[in-house]
Image: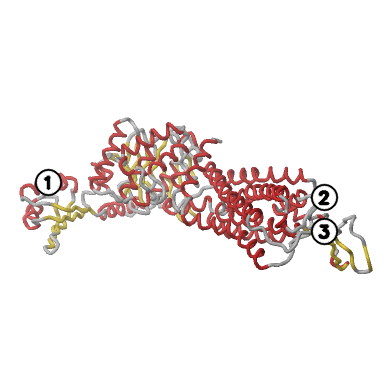
Amino acid sequence: MHVSAIWAVFQFERKRTATTTRWLWWLILSLFPIAISLFIRIYVDEEMMFSAFSLMLFYMIPAVVCVMGQLLWATPSVQSELEGKTWSFIALKPYGKIHLLLGKYLTSVAWTFFAALVCLTVVLFVTTPKVSHFERKEIVIEVPRSFDGFNFGNKRNRQTQQGTVKRRVGRLVPVEKMSNSERIHLWWIMATLSLFSCLNYGALFCLIGTILPRRAMVLAIGYTVIFELIVGFIPAIINQLTIQFRLRSLLLEWSGGELTGLTRNNPIFQSETSQWQHIGILLLLFPFLLAAGSYILHRRELIVSEDVN
Amino acid sequence: MDRVTRLYGDVIGANDISLELAPGAYGLLGPNGSGKTTLLNLITGRLHPTIGRINLLGFEPWNNAELYRRVGMCPSVSQLYPNISAYDWVNYLLKLQGHSKSQAKKDAEKALDLVKMTGAMHRKMGEFSRGMRQRTKLAQAIAHEPELLILDEPFSGLDPIGRHDLTEILKHQINQGKSVILASHILHEVETVTDSFLLIFGGRLLASGSAEEVHSMMVDVPNEISLKCSKPDLLSKHFVSDQSVLAVQIDRESSTLTVSTKSPKSFYETLPRWAKETNSSISEVRSSDESLQDLFDSLMRIHRGEK
């Protein structure tokens, strides 16, 4: 492994990819959460719960922006070189193939994480959804017992009558009037989750790009929809295999009880696993995925059409 | 190479090739689609042989970083990153070769200077002509001073001056003791650089030998050359008097002469004298590789035992 070669690829790719098209996509990606938050601010004249706001931020930034960014930029790492026929030059360099993959991975992480940080900062500090009044209070809702199938297990919940249970679903905090420390705390949570999201999804899509370079995008979208979106919400142990589950679990752990009422001990959202286990898994997963991608790329015979004459 | 065969599914890219080459310069000659690029990719370890073994400079070539330090490759592909300058690209590839930042900078500038691209090296490659792209590709291949230089169709798209410059660069490399393998489908291009040939067709290595030997094989195979000149009638009289010329066709409207000769080398050598004697200016000379195709067809028939 030659770190300076990876850095050389990163620098080269940074320069190569700074095209108008790339910046346009980057802007679309960054503007998406900003536009949603602006829409809520202008058109929704209702109080927004802190918990709902946190979840909204999570699904807009670490989930959508980071996943979309990595889908767009990490998945075609190898495919773009094959289609551009520049692979012929890279493949014959001593620090070519694997270093190219790792350098391109770093570039896609940088592009996506930068987009996530920009929109997170704007949404939290500029376009925060507006609320009508400021009052912190507990929100408790009654849900039919038949809907309560996931063993919520919150000690503060108490049964009131046959067929329904009362649930504390969150804290009502007009987000426009969140204190600075609350905003900064939430910024750190989302920034960290965005980084984990970029690192892991980027590595996953790079791996997919080495397994099936010419159909990488289709495979990556298929994987994301089937596993991260559908399987990720199945209340069974299988959802623990998804990156979404780990990120969601950390969100719930780190948001300091704001989201506990609806979600704690709900296997859709969270397991009993400690946050350190989730962090450990997320920190080990992306090097593992990158190592697998590098191995495949090293062993694989990839040729461009001109190579078959 | 020891009995190397490479299959692409049901298609044979290289067919039972055994070959041992001493250091030197070789021209790999064959029509388009004959298996030249497959052979080069097998030699450089980009492809695995389906059957057989390969050894290059004492190394098993597949994925061999040590070998890649000693080999420079100029592939036939003409696409380069359009929004990157030639300097940035060569510099980048040198870093992937393992060079330090300062060494890469120095070597990139030196290589681009050698291929006469210094003036344009900071321009984006998307603005380059085909000839400039060929020069840049050559620069990246020679920048790390490899002991073996492999070039796939390096003359493609070059103008006469570019061809001459490239020939000089390759001759310079050979004079410095570097080995060169040059793949082309045009005999005269290769002939200017080396007189050792490997003839490949249909994935088979059909023959090897010197330029004279190849020419002697082609003695009965006419080579067609067309010329645009100012005095086609006068010039044609000289052609007809030449023993090696088999037929001459004049197109007065376009001032073009089409000459069929069995000895193109002597024809090319005598052509300037004839032009001078007739005071005729020649603006364009084109040689088709039909003759070579005919030679390969003949060799294939011999190889199959049909003749």
Where is residue A73? Give x, y as percent: 55, 53
Query: How packed is label 2: few (under 14 Cα within 10 Å), some, or many (20 or more)?
Result: few
Marks 3, 2: nearer the viewer: 3
Where is residue B4? Give x, y as percent: 45, 44
Residue at the top extreme of this rendering: B176
Badge 2 sits on which subunit? Answer: A
Q: Is residue B229 above or below residue B154?
A: below
Marks 1 and 2 share the same chain:
no
Q: Secondary structure under badge 3?
A: strand
Residue tagged 1:
B272
In three-dimensional space, the C-alpha distance between marks 3 and 2, rounded to whole angstroms, equals 27 Å
> Position of A184 compared to B139: left or right?
right
Whether residue A237 is visible? yes
Q: Nearer the viewer, residue B102 or B251?
A: B102
Q: Nearer the viewer, residue A298 or A75?
A: A75
Residue tagged 3:
A137
Q: Secondary structure under badge 2?
A: loop
Q: Quadrant of residue B106?
A: top left
Q: Quadrant of residue B43?
A: top left
